[in-house]
Amino acid sequence: MDHQTMKLVVNNYDGHVSIMVIENEMCIATAGMDFMTDSWWLARVMVKHPHRKKGIGRRMVALLKENNNGYPIIVYPGGYDLTKEEQFAFYEQCGFVRKTEHSLELPV
């Protein structure tokens, strides 16, 4: 990720963490998770097509982990334009492990 041209915005408030990556005043990526009792639930990690495969998604996941307050992060991949297998592979590259057939967890 070219830190000279991109700006990271991290908001952490009241059980919600959101991240935006801004380039040339445009949002090119976003991620968000919400705290639910004893773990975080990852709602999305989305990078616009021209900016994929540049480490932006992995950097956002790392920032989410930095803001997890010592609790695991759980994700149920699906939606968007990647297959479930591609999404599972992305999260596994970021350190998540399969929890169930449909979910992964980033352990503490």
Image: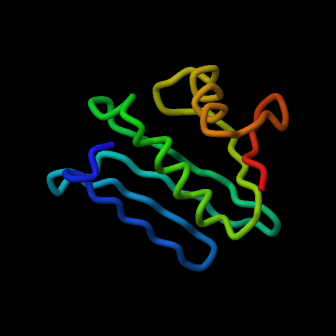
Placement of 65 over or under 2, stated as above or below? below
Q: How is the image coloured?
A: rainbow
Residue extending farthest bottom: 14
Quadrant where the C terminus lies?
A: bottom right
Residue 24 picture location, percent across and down: 15, 52
Residue 6 picture location, percent across and down: 25, 52
* Nearer-the-camera pick, 81 or 61: 61
* Nearer-the-camera pick, 93 or 100: 93
Give the residue at x 84% y 34%. 100
Placement of 24 over or under 56, stated as above or below? below
Placement of 41 over or under 29, stated as above or below? below
Quadrant where the N terminus lies?
A: top left
Residue 51 picture location, percent across and down: 30, 34
Image quadrant where residue 53 sits = top left
Image quadrant where residue 78 sits = top right
User: How many numbered marks are there?
Assistant: 0
**Residue 50 appears left or right of 96:** left
Residue 62 picture location, percent across and down: 55, 51
Give the residue at x 46% y 71%. 11
* Nearer-the-camera pick, 55 or 39: 55
**Residue 6 appears left or right of 31:** left
Give the residue at x 69% y 70%. 69
Give the residue at x 54% y 78%. 13
